[in-house]
């Protein structure tokens, strides 16, 4: 997509962190009755970044977003936008726009009127021509030029999604909040829209805060991800960092897939922990900070880190191929290991002649590089 | 049972209802309206336009009805809307049902008895006496068009509140949030989102009340003291007093035609106002 | 009920009770509201609502259906009738003779006994809606004891169709505390003073027979006139006074009692009731004349319980029973046997039994007056003017 020089003047910053945060949460609590929906949230959002809240249903992602938008007031703590505490500022007073999960398009207005809605609320009033021009640009950005007069309910799901996006970005908000904006779309459309979203964000440079419980979406789109659990932010980091260095089993499980082997820490030395499994095996992996001998822990090995061999190798464990799923680029195996149970193995096809792939029921030997395994606290 | 048979089974009661309740009486009225009055009243078959030629004799009744029915509808709407809004939007869900029931409770009593209560409230020893105490003398309320208007609004308020309540209650609250998010203050949100989207409820309420008001006779008889004469009163007199069924049928048929025309024009108007809306639900 | 100040709870409840008893005014209230027919239909449609017939059933059946006027009977008499015969009296009240006629014309009324007014009987006969009476089944009917003026209309072309129930007059009731010391004695006073010191305080009936009839008397015309020019005069008068009227309604008791209205056209029984409760309300017969009427018991064609109908009429004609009726509702009877049993106070009451010269000036309504389409149209024009 070509860059369109629009009046949404948010140049992408080369070093977003160098500038003061565009928005922040400071010690924010939110309680609904006896449910703690936000538990001591602390977060700074850098201008121009694409941040995601990732977590299971009910963990408080929407609540965090709604506090930024102004639909919920924190029970305690501060919400800042552009350096100002905005706790008492109503949604209509905040330079923030939201794309709702169900789009919330106005059914009694056509596409252009929906998109121009925010502009029409401005005081002093904008000239009609000015509004029309901005709406035209926004439609161009979301590739819906020519759809001005269409009724919103005559549009497909993906088109409605883009109208909702256009309705928000046309106001040039400091912060664009997106609450599971793609959840209602089918898989293929979702993929397309993910790419469009990313393009759009780069193009206009607005700070995006996305809520999702789809880890793939978070990983592929975000500059930074906040993994949430029961109202708390468990870990924040860029996608690769989270993937490679999860701080807990919870994060490792939520970001990507992994094999977990429970056991007890025997000793820790030079950042390498030795784990004893109940079945008597001794396994090694990079130790998570704070682990010490005697702790309950679990070893996490990503499926792609496990190697399969026809013949035994030093330190390899015997197993049987239980199931095989051909994924094209990769093949996913389910290997039954007598002491460790079922393990997920992802083998690249690259460089493997077809007759080298393993068949169901075939005995195999597996091993992994201990440096690529992690010993994590169990929860 | 085939699908076709099932469909017939479903449609038959509705069709029967339509024929028995609507087509049949209407046909009778239509035929009678070309007849003549018998010497001792009633109906004598004939084919004459005399009854229709005589319609101007009831001009005032039509005029009163055509003024007070729309006026009453609008007044009821203006009062019902804030009430419905309060109930649907501003009330804690656990109170909603109780408050809604309170709106219907008066309907459990006969309109006759409720209108009687108004006779005493608006009568000389009611409100006017209260006004006298604060120094406003000589206010005459009972047996005036104003009293009829009050009775109408009071009597038909629940019919207006309900459809408006339903349309406001069904309104997607996220649209209101979206509007606020896009910078609209609460009152702007009301004007640009809530109000337009509750139009179907308002339209339904207005139609229900208007149609019923067009045929109203009890409230004008009780609160108008016989001086505020509706078409409904003319019909009561024609059928029960002078027993001029032929003329009564002509008046009734004319009323129905006026009603149909008004309602059709009104529906067109509402439909145009809402043109293209998928969820147009006038009735 | 004379105090001003806002309406008290008690007052309201009392009015409501009065309304429920059906005692608002003799006629027409139900006619105006169209409820007479509705109650009648309800009464037959919901037999479960009726009390059980007494066990001592006789051969006349378990019930008798009576179509009559509101507040026109002593219910204790009905109970005694039921005790004696086992037939329960189902009462349907009506608002106007027109309504009764309409119901009978429509057919299938289910009535056994009804109470037509004098001027309707010939119409019922000509429409073949009324049964000739078999006097042998009415041993209590002593024709000679009745003042013929009030029993004549029951006989049409030598055949007896109806026997007298009560009679009464149509005059006006005036609250004398507002007449400034000058009393009203004529229909001329009634209409002239309405345009003057009674402006906004007068009520006329919502009933063509009396309202037009009394307006005709203003000019000295016959109460029953159907002369075009005379009716035109009456119409002019009525339209002239209309702006001065408090209401056009036959339900005048509440307004008279609350003090909202000071002057109203009025039937005997209402006049009696108003005067009894508020002595300052006088009942006046216009000097020019006006209406005298007589109600009758009759049996409609096709009455389902004919024996019970005869039994009921005969029972009601028993002077003992009839005397109790008069005491209860305050309308006079024309039966010397009954009058002999009535207390002096009632017989000497000028409202029930007006002076002979006033009475002589009164006219009975005529059949033509009731059914005249021009008079009906005149009233409609007046009401919608
Ligand atoms: N208005 C409210 N009243 C009461 N409880 C609420 C309210 N809003 C949210 N909660 C509760 O707060 C918790 C967090 O809710 P939230 O909607 O933020 O979750 P989420 O992470 O967005 O979940 P999902 O992925 O299902 O949308 C939940 O337990 C929820 O039930
Ligand atoms: Mg959510």
Image: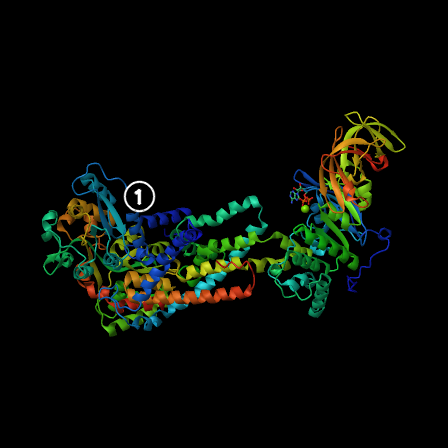
Is B278 situated left or right of A245 in this image?
A: left
Is A156 situated left or right of B38 in this image?
A: right
Asked whether the viewer can see residue C196, the reply is no
Q: Local crowd at mark 1 within 10 Å, few (<14), some, or many (≥20)? A: few
Looking at the image, which is closer to me, B69 or A163?
A: A163
Q: Residue furthest bottom?
A: C229
Asked whether the viewer can see residue A304, the reply is yes
Q: Residue furthest right?
A: A270
Is B158 situated left or right of A145 in this image?
A: left
**Residue A237 location (% of width, % of height):** 81, 44
**Residue A111 location (% of width, % of height):** 65, 62
Looking at the image, which is closer to me, B158 or C153?
A: B158
In the displayed structure, C194 sits above or below C36; it is below
Q: Residue furthest front?
A: A355
Q: Quadrant of residue A114?
A: bottom right
Q: Quadrant of residue B248?
A: bottom left
Tell me the quadrant of the picture where the C terminus of chain C can be found. Answer: bottom left
**Residue A85 location (% of width, % of height):** 77, 50
| Number of disc labels | 1
Residue sitting at 16 percent across and 41 percent down? C59
Q: Quadrant of ligand 1?
A: top right
Q: Quadrant of residue B249?
A: bottom left
Residue sitting at 72 percent across and 44 percent down? A326
| Residue occupied by mark 1 | C49
Label 1 chain ID: C
Looking at the image, which is closer to me, A165 or A24?
A: A165
**Residue A265 location (% of width, % of height):** 82, 28
Element type at mark 1 = helix
């Amino acid at each position: 997509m070509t860059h369109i020089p629009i009046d949404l003047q948010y140049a992408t910053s080369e070093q977003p962190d160098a500038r003061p945060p565009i928005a922040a949460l400071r010690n924010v609590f939110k309680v609904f009755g006896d449910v703690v929906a936000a538990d001591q949230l602390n977060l700074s959002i850098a201008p121009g970044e694409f941040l995601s809240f990732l977590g299971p249903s009910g963990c408080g992602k929407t609540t965090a977003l709604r506090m930024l938008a102004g639909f919920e007031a924190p029970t305690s703590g501060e919400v800042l936008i552009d350096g100002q505490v905005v706790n008492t500022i109503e949604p209509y007073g905040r330079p923030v726009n939201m794309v709702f999960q169900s789009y919330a398009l106005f059914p009694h207005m056509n596409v252009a009127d929906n998109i121009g809605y925010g502009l029409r609320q401005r005081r002093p009033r904008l000239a009609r021509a000015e509004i029309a021009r901005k709406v035209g640009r926004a439609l161009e950005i979301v590739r819906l030029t020519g759809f001005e007069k269409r009724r919103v309910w005559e549009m497909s799901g993906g088109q409605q999604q883009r109208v909702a996006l256009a309705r928000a970005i046309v106001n040039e908000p400091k912060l664009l909040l997106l609450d599971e904006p793609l959840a209602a779309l089918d898989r293929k459309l979702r993929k397309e829209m993910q790419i469009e979203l990313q393009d759009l964000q780069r193009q206009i440079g607005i700070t995006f805060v996305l809520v999702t419980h789809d880890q793939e979406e978070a990983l592929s789109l975000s500059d930074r991800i906040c993994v949430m659990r029961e109202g708390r932010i468990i870990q924040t980091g860029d996608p690769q960092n989270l993937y490679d260095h999860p701080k807990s089993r919870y994060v490792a499980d939520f970001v990507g897939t992994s094999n977990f082997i429970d056991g007890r820490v025997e000793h820790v030395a030079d950042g390498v922990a030795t784990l004893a499994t109940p079945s008597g095996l001794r396994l090694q992996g990079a130790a998570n900070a704070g682990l010490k001998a005697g702790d309950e822990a679990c070893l996490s090995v990503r499926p792609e880190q496990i190697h399969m061999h026809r013949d035994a190798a030093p330190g390899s464990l015997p197993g049987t191929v239980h199931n095989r799923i051909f994924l094209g680029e990769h093949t996913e195996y389910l290997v039954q290991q007598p002491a460790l149970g079922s393990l997920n193995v992802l083998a690249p096809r690259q460089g493997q002649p077809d007759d080298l792939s393993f068949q169901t029921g075939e005995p195999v030997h597996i091993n992994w590089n201990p440096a690529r395994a992690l010993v994590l606290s169990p929860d | 049972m085939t699908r076709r048979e099932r469909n017939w089974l479903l449609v038959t009661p509705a069709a029967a209802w339509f024929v028995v309740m609507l087509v049949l009486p209407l046909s009778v009225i239509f035929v009678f309206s070309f007849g003549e009055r018998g010497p001792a009243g009633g109906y004598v078959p004939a084919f004459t336009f005399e009854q229709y030629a005589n319609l101007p004799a009831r001009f005032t009744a039509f005029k009163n009805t055509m003024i007070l029915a729309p006026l009453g509808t609008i007044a009821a709407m203006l009062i019902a809307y804030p009430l419905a809004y309060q109930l649907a939007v501003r009330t804690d869900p656990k109170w909603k049902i109780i408050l809604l029931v309170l709106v219907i409770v008066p309907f459990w009593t006969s309109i006759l008895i409720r209108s009687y209560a108004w006779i005493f409230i608006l009568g000389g020893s009611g409100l006017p006496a209260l006004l006298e105490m604060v120094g406003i003398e000589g206010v005459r309320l009972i047996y005036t068009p104003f009293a009829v208007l009050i009775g109408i609004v009071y009597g038909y308020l629940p019919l207006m509140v309900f459809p408006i309540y339903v349309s406001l209650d069904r309104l997607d609250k996220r649209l209101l949030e979206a509007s606020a998010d896009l910078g609209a203050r609460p009152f702007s949100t009301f004007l640009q989102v809530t109000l337009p989207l509750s139009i179907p409820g308002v339209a339904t309420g207005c139609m229900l009340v208007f149609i019923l008001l067009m045929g109203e006779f009890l409230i004008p008889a009780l609160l108008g003291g016989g001086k505020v004469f509706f078409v409904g009163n003319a019909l009561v007199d024609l059928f029960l007093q002078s027993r001029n069924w032929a003329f009564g049928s002509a008046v009734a048929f004319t009323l129905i035609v006026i009603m149909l025309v008004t309602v059709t024009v009104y529906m067109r108007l509402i439909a145009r106002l809402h043109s293209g809306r998928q969820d147009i639900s006038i009735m | 009920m004379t105090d001003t100040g806002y309406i008290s709870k008690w007052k309201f409840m009392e009015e409501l009770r009065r309304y429920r008893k059906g005692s608002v005014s003799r006629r027409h209230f139900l006619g105006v509201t169209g409820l007479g027919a509705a109650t009648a239909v309800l009464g037959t449609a919901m037999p479960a609502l009726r009390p059980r017939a007494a066990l001592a059933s006789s051969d006349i059946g378990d019930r008798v259906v009576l179509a009559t006027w509101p507040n026109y009977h002593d219910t204790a008499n009905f109970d005694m009738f039921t005790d004696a015969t086992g037939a329960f009296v189902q009462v349907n009240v009506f608002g106007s003779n027109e309504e009764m006629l309409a119901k009978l014309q429509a057919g299938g009324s289910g009535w056994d006994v009804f109470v037509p007014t004098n001027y309707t009987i010939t119409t019922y006969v000509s429409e073949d809606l009324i049964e000739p009476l078999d006097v042998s089944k009415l041993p209590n009917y002593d024709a000679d004891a009745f003042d013929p003026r009030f029993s004549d209309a029951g006989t049409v072309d030598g055949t007896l169709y109806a026997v007298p129930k009560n009679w009464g007059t149509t005059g006006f009731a005036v609250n004398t505390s507002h007449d400034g010391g000058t009393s009203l004695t004529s229909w001329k006073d009634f209409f002239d003073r309405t345009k003057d010191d009674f402006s906004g305080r007068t009520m006329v009936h919502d009933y063509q027979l009396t309202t037009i009839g009394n307006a005709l008397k203003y000019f000295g015309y016959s109460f029953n006139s159907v002369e075009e020019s005379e009716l035109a005069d009456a119409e002019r008068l009525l339209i002239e006074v209309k702006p001065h009227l408090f209401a056009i309604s036959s339900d005048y008791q509440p307004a008279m009692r609350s003090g909202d209205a000071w002057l109203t056209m009025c039937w005997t029984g209402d006049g009696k009731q108003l005067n009894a409760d508020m002595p300052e309300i006088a009942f006046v017969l216009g000097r020019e004349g006006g209406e005298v009427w007589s109600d009758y018991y009759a049996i409609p064609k096709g009455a389902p319980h004919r024996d019970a109908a005869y039994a009921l009429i005969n029972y009601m004609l028993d002077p003992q029973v009839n005397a109790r009726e008069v005491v209860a509702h305050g309308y006079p009877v024309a039966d010397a046997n009954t009058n002999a049993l009535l207390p002096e106070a009632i017989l000497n009451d000028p409202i029930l039994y007006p002076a002979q010269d006033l009475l002589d000036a009164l006219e009975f309504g005529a059949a033509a007056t009731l059914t005249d389409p021009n008079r009906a149209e005149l009233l409609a024009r007046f009401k919608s003017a």
